[in-house]
Image (cartoon, rainbow, N blue to C red):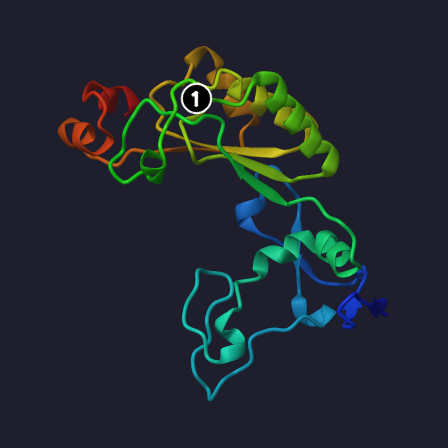
Amino acid sequence: MLDTQKNRFGETIVTNLPDDIITKKHGGHSLRTNRVIVDRKKIGLDSNQDAQKEKQPNTYSGHTYKNSDKEKYHLDGHKMMYHMDRIVEWQQGKRIAPIHIDMGLTKFCNTGCIYCIGVTQGMVKGTMIKPEALLRFIDDCGRLKVRSLAFIGDGEPTLNPAMYDAVVRGGEVGVDIGISTNGLLIDLDRAHDLLSNATFLRFNLSSAEPENFLKVHQSKAEGFNHLV
């Protein structure tokens, strides 16, 4: 039997997951987690209904068309299946920590990519999160059970010397950390810390040859060979 109760919106919600619910692992989450997704039909969650026998959007991919006003604002919800505990707590009106946080470690960059919104917002050389504040924030995320962080946006994260210690600390407190970087300034002496603790490293290489690298990234052409 499913346990149910009324949430703060007056709706009946499921507050437990029976042991016999069918679960399956998702390949994209197999690196550092054993979280699973559940069969939503078994716990009474809405699923897309046929609309005049039209082809339905694939809820396990990106956005497609919507068939009704109700579905117009429907977002793909499969990722929520990994976080049923947070959903139940939210439905019960409890305060919950974010599942994921995007954050910038700096407000300046060593390149000037022509498409970067950060350039248009303005950069201030030397502006960055201080090491003690960053590590304290990582500790807080672990304590509050934030599940992942991404050092992405604003400036170049490798310009903050504390980035490497932050990634190691994330591994220690159980917070997955991903990094988006231009890769030009990675400290090879500490690359093992990133490989051992980061969930992903995303390198931005928007050119196939040094000449265009200079034009697009507005960085020295020899940086292309260094990055490759």
- Identify the amino acid type marked 1: Thr
Residue 105 drawn at (x, y percent) = 49, 27
Question: On the rendered structure, is 202 left or right of 14?
Answer: left
**Residue 37: which quarter of the image?**
bottom right
- In the picture of the structure, the residue carrying the numbered disc 1 is 158
Residue 166 drawn at (x, y percent) = 58, 22
Residue 51 drawn at (x, y percent) = 49, 85
Question: On the rendered structure, is 127 left or right of 113?
Answer: right
The residue depicted at 20 percent of the width and 34 percent of the height is 208
Neighbour tally class for label 1: few under 14, some 14-19, many 20 plus, Cα within 10 Å = many
Residue 9 drawn at (x, y percent) = 75, 69
Farthest residue, direction bottom: 52
- In the rendered image, the vertical position of residue 46 relative to residue 174, given as above or below: below
- Residue 16 or residue 71, whichever sits in front: 71
- In the rendered image, the vertical position of residue 160 relative to residue 5, given as above or below: above
Question: On the rendered structure, is 1 left or right of 163?
Answer: right
Q: Is residue 209 visible?
A: no
State the quadrant of the C terminus: top left
Question: On the rendered structure, is 189 left or right of 224?
Answer: right
Q: Secondary structure at mark 1?
A: helix
